[in-house]
Amino acid sequence: MYDNAVSYVHDVLSRALGMGSVAIDATVGNGWDTAFMAELVGSSGVVYGFDIQQLALDVTRTRTNNLNADVRLFRTGHEEMLTCIDTAHLGKVNAITFNLGYLPGGDEHITTVAETTRRGLDQARAALAPDGVLTVVCYRHAEGETELAMVRDFLSTWPQQRYTVVEVDFVNQVNKPPVVFVVSGRAVQPNTLRI
Ligand SMILES: C[S@@+](CC[C@H](N)C(=O)[O-])C[C@H]1O[C@@H](n2cnc3c(N)ncnc32)[C@H](O)[C@@H]1O
Protein backbone atom coordinates (compact mmCIF):
# COMPACT_ATOMS: atom_id res chain seq x y z
CA MET A 1 0.00 0.00 0.00
CA TYR A 2 2.69 2.48 1.05
CA ASP A 3 5.94 1.45 -0.64
CA ASN A 4 7.83 4.56 0.32
CA ALA A 5 7.61 8.15 1.53
CA VAL A 6 6.39 9.46 -1.82
CA SER A 7 3.48 7.02 -2.12
CA TYR A 8 2.52 7.79 1.46
CA VAL A 9 2.58 11.55 0.82
CA HIS A 10 0.60 11.18 -2.39
CA ASP A 11 -2.09 9.30 -0.52
CA VAL A 12 -2.29 12.11 2.05
CA LEU A 13 -2.43 14.75 -0.70
CA SER A 14 -5.13 12.89 -2.59
CA ARG A 15 -7.34 13.03 0.51
CA ALA A 16 -6.69 16.74 1.02
CA LEU A 17 -7.17 17.94 -2.56
CA GLY A 18 -10.06 17.86 -4.99
CA MET A 19 -11.22 19.74 -8.06
CA GLY A 20 -10.84 23.49 -7.46
CA SER A 21 -8.41 23.16 -4.54
CA VAL A 22 -5.32 25.32 -4.09
CA ALA A 23 -1.97 23.59 -3.52
CA ILE A 24 1.69 24.51 -3.13
CA ASP A 25 4.70 22.42 -4.09
CA ALA A 26 7.44 24.10 -2.06
CA THR A 27 10.24 22.15 -3.81
CA VAL A 28 9.21 21.25 -7.36
CA GLY A 29 12.41 19.39 -8.36
CA ASN A 30 11.54 17.11 -11.26
CA GLY A 31 7.87 18.03 -11.01
CA TRP A 32 6.37 14.69 -10.01
CA ASP A 33 4.58 16.12 -6.96
CA THR A 34 3.50 19.24 -8.89
CA ALA A 35 1.99 17.11 -11.66
CA PHE A 36 0.30 14.81 -9.16
CA MET A 37 -1.34 17.76 -7.42
CA ALA A 38 -2.24 19.46 -10.72
CA GLU A 39 -4.25 16.40 -11.74
CA LEU A 40 -6.05 16.41 -8.40
CA VAL A 41 -7.06 20.09 -8.48
CA GLY A 42 -7.97 20.19 -12.20
CA SER A 43 -8.56 23.26 -14.33
CA SER A 44 -10.57 25.03 -11.62
CA GLY A 45 -7.77 24.78 -9.07
CA VAL A 46 -4.29 26.26 -8.76
CA VAL A 47 -0.89 24.74 -8.00
CA TYR A 48 1.96 27.05 -7.03
CA GLY A 49 5.46 25.66 -7.40
CA PHE A 50 8.77 26.93 -6.02
CA ASP A 51 12.36 26.00 -6.74
CA ILE A 52 15.66 27.87 -6.81
CA GLN A 53 16.90 26.05 -9.94
CA GLN A 54 15.77 26.96 -13.45
CA LEU A 55 16.41 23.37 -14.54
CA ALA A 56 13.79 22.14 -12.08
CA LEU A 57 11.25 24.66 -13.29
CA ASP A 58 11.88 23.77 -16.94
CA VAL A 59 11.45 20.04 -16.31
CA THR A 60 8.31 20.69 -14.29
CA ARG A 61 6.82 23.00 -16.92
CA THR A 62 7.34 20.29 -19.55
CA ARG A 63 5.80 17.66 -17.27
CA THR A 64 2.70 19.73 -16.54
CA ASN A 65 2.19 21.45 -19.91
CA ASN A 66 -0.31 18.92 -21.17
CA LEU A 67 -2.32 18.82 -17.97
CA ASN A 68 -5.43 20.94 -17.95
CA ALA A 69 -4.35 22.86 -14.86
CA ASP A 70 -3.30 26.29 -13.63
CA VAL A 71 0.33 25.65 -12.59
CA ARG A 72 2.21 28.78 -11.49
CA LEU A 73 5.96 28.23 -11.18
CA PHE A 74 8.40 30.60 -9.46
CA ARG A 75 12.17 30.57 -9.44
CA THR A 76 12.04 31.66 -5.83
CA GLY A 77 12.91 30.01 -2.54
CA HIS A 78 9.93 28.71 -0.58
CA GLU A 79 11.00 31.08 2.19
CA GLU A 80 9.50 33.82 -0.02
CA MET A 81 6.29 32.03 -0.99
CA LEU A 82 3.99 34.57 0.61
CA THR A 83 5.24 37.26 -1.75
CA CYS A 84 4.22 35.13 -4.76
CA ILE A 85 0.84 33.63 -4.02
CA ASP A 86 -2.36 35.48 -4.81
CA THR A 87 -3.62 37.39 -1.75
CA ALA A 88 -7.01 35.71 -2.28
CA HIS A 89 -5.31 32.39 -1.50
CA LEU A 90 -3.57 33.46 1.70
CA GLY A 91 -4.79 31.30 4.56
CA LYS A 92 -6.81 29.19 2.11
CA VAL A 93 -4.30 26.73 0.67
CA ASN A 94 -5.60 23.17 1.00
CA ALA A 95 -2.30 21.31 0.81
CA ILE A 96 1.40 22.17 0.82
CA THR A 97 4.21 19.70 0.25
CA PHE A 98 7.94 19.98 0.93
CA ASN A 99 10.22 17.28 -0.47
CA LEU A 100 13.58 18.35 0.93
CA GLY A 101 17.09 17.64 -0.32
CA TYR A 102 18.64 17.99 -3.76
CA LEU A 103 17.33 17.63 -7.30
CA PRO A 104 17.54 13.92 -8.26
CA GLY A 105 19.92 13.71 -11.22
CA GLY A 106 21.09 17.27 -10.61
CA ASP A 107 23.79 19.01 -8.56
CA GLU A 108 23.83 17.37 -5.14
CA HIS A 109 25.43 20.48 -3.65
CA ILE A 110 22.32 22.55 -4.33
CA THR A 111 20.09 21.37 -1.54
CA THR A 112 17.52 22.69 0.86
CA VAL A 113 19.06 23.92 4.11
CA ALA A 114 17.63 24.08 7.60
CA GLU A 115 17.54 27.85 7.99
CA THR A 116 15.55 28.59 4.82
CA THR A 117 13.42 25.47 5.25
CA ARG A 118 12.36 26.75 8.65
CA ARG A 119 11.38 30.09 7.14
CA GLY A 120 9.55 28.25 4.37
CA LEU A 121 7.58 26.21 6.90
CA ASP A 122 6.70 29.38 8.76
CA GLN A 123 5.35 30.92 5.57
CA ALA A 124 3.51 27.70 4.72
CA ARG A 125 1.77 27.90 8.06
CA ALA A 126 0.47 31.37 7.17
CA ALA A 127 -0.66 30.21 3.73
CA LEU A 128 -2.42 27.05 4.90
CA ALA A 129 -6.20 26.86 5.31
CA PRO A 130 -7.40 26.12 8.86
CA ASP A 131 -8.23 22.56 7.76
CA GLY A 132 -5.30 22.29 5.32
CA VAL A 133 -2.60 19.64 5.22
CA LEU A 134 1.17 20.09 5.12
CA THR A 135 3.61 17.29 4.34
CA VAL A 136 7.39 17.35 4.72
CA VAL A 137 9.74 14.62 3.47
CA CYS A 138 13.17 14.74 5.15
CA TYR A 139 16.24 12.84 3.92
CA ARG A 140 19.21 11.73 5.95
CA HIS A 141 22.28 12.92 4.05
CA ALA A 142 24.56 15.22 6.11
CA GLU A 143 22.54 18.45 5.77
CA GLY A 144 19.40 16.34 5.80
CA GLU A 145 20.01 15.15 9.36
CA THR A 146 20.32 18.76 10.52
CA GLU A 147 17.13 19.63 8.66
CA LEU A 148 15.28 16.61 10.02
CA ALA A 149 16.10 17.67 13.59
CA MET A 150 15.05 21.24 12.86
CA VAL A 151 11.76 20.17 11.24
CA ARG A 152 10.91 17.89 14.16
CA ASP A 153 11.77 20.56 16.73
CA PHE A 154 9.96 23.32 14.86
CA LEU A 155 6.77 21.37 14.14
CA SER A 156 6.71 20.25 17.77
CA THR A 157 6.11 23.88 18.74
CA TRP A 158 2.96 24.25 16.61
CA PRO A 159 0.00 24.41 19.01
CA GLN A 160 -1.95 21.18 19.33
CA GLN A 161 -5.23 23.09 19.52
CA ARG A 162 -4.72 24.09 15.89
CA TYR A 163 -2.59 21.33 14.37
CA THR A 164 -2.06 17.60 14.60
CA VAL A 165 1.55 16.73 13.74
CA VAL A 166 2.47 13.13 12.90
CA GLU A 167 5.92 11.68 12.16
CA VAL A 168 6.09 8.60 9.90
CA ASP A 169 9.23 6.45 9.80
CA PHE A 170 9.70 3.36 7.59
CA VAL A 171 11.31 1.43 10.41
CA ASN A 172 12.20 -1.81 8.57
CA GLN A 173 13.71 -0.19 5.47
CA VAL A 174 17.48 -0.22 4.94
CA ASN A 175 19.72 2.68 3.87
CA LYS A 176 18.23 5.42 6.02
CA PRO A 177 14.80 5.90 4.43
CA PRO A 178 13.29 9.38 4.50
CA VAL A 179 11.07 10.52 7.35
CA VAL A 180 7.67 12.07 6.63
CA PHE A 181 5.86 14.65 8.72
CA VAL A 182 2.15 15.27 8.19
CA VAL A 183 0.53 18.35 9.71
CA SER A 184 -3.27 18.50 9.67
CA GLY A 185 -5.01 21.74 10.50
CA ARG A 186 -7.79 21.35 13.03
CA ALA A 187 -10.45 23.70 11.68
CA VAL A 188 -12.74 23.32 14.66
CA GLN A 189 -11.20 24.20 18.01
CA PRO A 190 -11.99 21.35 20.46
CA ASN A 191 -13.01 23.80 23.19
CA THR A 192 -15.65 25.38 20.94
CA LEU A 193 -17.43 22.08 20.29
CA ARG A 194 -20.87 21.78 21.88
CA ILE A 195 -22.04 18.31 22.79
C1 LIG B 1 14.14 16.38 -3.56
S1 LIG B 1 13.96 17.67 -4.73
C2 LIG B 1 12.21 17.78 -4.91
C3 LIG B 1 11.58 16.63 -5.65
C4 LIG B 1 10.26 16.97 -6.28
N1 LIG B 1 9.25 17.28 -5.32
C5 LIG B 1 9.77 15.97 -7.31
O1 LIG B 1 8.59 15.61 -7.33
O2 LIG B 1 10.58 15.59 -8.16
C6 LIG B 1 14.35 19.13 -3.79
C7 LIG B 1 14.33 20.42 -4.60
O3 LIG B 1 14.38 21.51 -3.68
C8 LIG B 1 14.98 22.59 -4.34
N2 LIG B 1 15.33 23.66 -3.38
C9 LIG B 1 16.47 23.84 -2.68
N3 LIG B 1 16.35 24.93 -1.87
C10 LIG B 1 15.11 25.45 -2.10
C11 LIG B 1 14.40 26.57 -1.59
N4 LIG B 1 14.92 27.39 -0.65
N5 LIG B 1 13.15 26.80 -2.05
C12 LIG B 1 12.58 25.98 -2.99
N6 LIG B 1 13.21 24.90 -3.51
C13 LIG B 1 14.46 24.63 -3.06
C14 LIG B 1 16.15 21.96 -5.05
O4 LIG B 1 16.60 22.79 -6.10
C15 LIG B 1 15.52 20.65 -5.54
O5 LIG B 1 15.08 20.75 -6.86
Image (cartoon, helix red, strand yellow):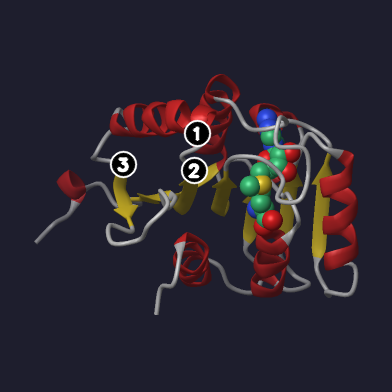
Q: Amino acid at mark 3?
A: Arg
Q: Residue at x 24, y 39 (%)?
A: 160
Residue 108: give x, y in percent of width and height: 70, 37
Proximity of marks 2 and 1: CB atoms separated by less than 8 Å: yes
How far apart are labels 2 and 1 at the CA level?
5 Å
How far apart are labels 1 and 3 at the CA level?
27 Å
Which comes sooner in the sequence, label 3 or label 2?
2
Per the image, the residue denoted by label 3 is: 162
How far apart are labels 3 and 2 at the CA level?
27 Å
The relative height of residue 122 versus residue 185 in the rendered view (above or below) is: above
The relative height of residue 126 versus residue 62 in the rendered view (above or below) is: above
Q: Amino acid at mark 1?
A: Gly
Label number found at residue 194: none
Per the image, the residue denoted by label 2 is: 139
- Label 3 residue SS: loop
Q: Amino acid at mark 2?
A: Tyr
Circle 2: is it few (<14), some (14-19), or many (20+) Cα within 10 Å?
A: many
Left or right of 51, for residue 92: left
Residue 174: give x, y in percent of width and height: 37, 57
Left or right of 25, for residue 154: left
Per the image, the residue denoted by label 1 is: 144
- Label 2 residue SS: loop
Q: Is 186 in front, or is 98?
A: 98
Q: Is 109 in front, or is 195?
A: 109
Which comes sooner in the sequence, label 2 or label 1?
2
Q: Which tag is nearer the camera, tag 3 or tag 2?
A: 2
